[in-house]
Image (cartoon, rainbow, N blue to C red):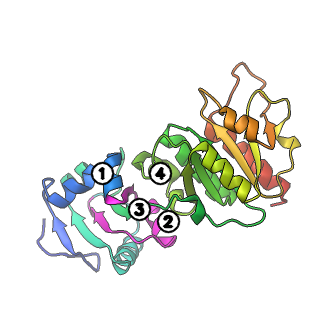
Amino acid sequence: MPSSHHERGFDFDLVVTSPANSRVKETVRMRRRHHRREAGATLVEGFEELRLAVGAGIRPRSVFFCPELASHQAGAEEQLLRQCAQAGAAVVRVTSAVFEKLAYRQSPDGWLAVLPSVTTELAHISLRPDSLVVVCESVEKPGNLGAILRTADAAGLAAVVAAGPVTDWGNPNLVRASKGALFTVAVGEGTADEVLAWLRQERITVVATTPDSDRPYTAVDMTGATAIVVGAEQHGLSGTWLTGADERVHIPMFGHVDSLNVATTAAIVAYEAVRQRGL
């Protein structure tokens, strides 16, 4: 590999050719939750995901770029490299062998960055009088939370909140499943009691989804400030939500199974709220 730090019209801060490099090792450690927590950081892999994060105002700490794996237009890649550098990131060019150690996706495109952790305090979530929020109780699979974030971004939701969080918002698999929406949608977390109290304080109508309800989700007015509450498929919602909700609704099922995937449930009910608002 050439020793020059200059490529594609961009001057890199560093060129790394060894997978044993200390910066590489420290980044790999951030796949583990306690290392992310200690560093106050998370990982994002992928050109589109990083571009979305930077476009949302996130300032990367470091960016690793492998030209051999890059598959996007050179002009767009150079622009993103410059945006990251202008945001204060250390931009590092690496070999394919180094990136193979860094990557956690099956088909890497040569982009991986270390970003600061997202803010999860409920008080930091900005709401409007008609805000739509999804609350996820004890949803364990990062892929489901990521999919819910994608729906939230697409439907223009104000926030996604984890009640009794099982995984952390910086989980790389969650970031990947969200396609970068983690950085465009506000997120929060707290115990079920804390989240319910926050919703009451913000005067948000709580709509709990449960197969035990006899009221279809289309029968409830969700044109005002609304929180759609979904639970993990195995256990559903806890008593905190079933007794504390203003409305309990179900999605009609016409087959043999008695429930939908939690991300699918959130998407169906969220888009019904969007439909009711005439959007």
What SS does tag 3 mark? helix
**Which span is picked out in magenta?**
39-68
- Along the line of sight, the residue nearer the viewer: 191 or 9: 191
Q: Residues within 10 Å of mark 4 (few under 14, many from 20)?
A: many
Query: Are discs 1 and 2 less than 8 Å apart at CB?
Result: no
Q: Which residue is mark 1?
A: 35
Q: Earlier in the sequence, mark 1 or mark 2?
A: 1
Q: CA distance from mark 4 to mark 1?
A: 14 Å
Residue 157's x, y, as percent? Answer: 67, 58
Quadrant of the rendered image containing residue 225: bottom right
Residue type at mark 1: give it: His
In this rendering, the answer to whether 193 lies above or below 153 is above
Assess whether residue 187 is covered by the magenta stretch: no
Residue type at mark 3: give it: Phe
63 relative to 49 in the view: left or right: left
Q: CA distance from mark 2 to mark 3?
A: 9 Å
Q: Which residue is mark 3?
A: 47
Of discs 3 and 4, which sits in the foreground? Answer: 4
Whether residue 120 is visible to the viewer of this picture, yes or no, is yes
Residue 177's x, y, as percent? Answer: 49, 48
Residue type at mark 4: give it: Trp
What SS does tag 2 mark? helix
**In the picture, which quadrant includes the C terminus?**
bottom right
- Along the line of sight, the residue nearer the viewer: 108 or 84: 84
Q: Earlier in the sequence, mark 3 or mark 1?
A: 1
The disc at residue 169 is 4
Of discs 1 and 2, which sits in the foreground? Answer: 1
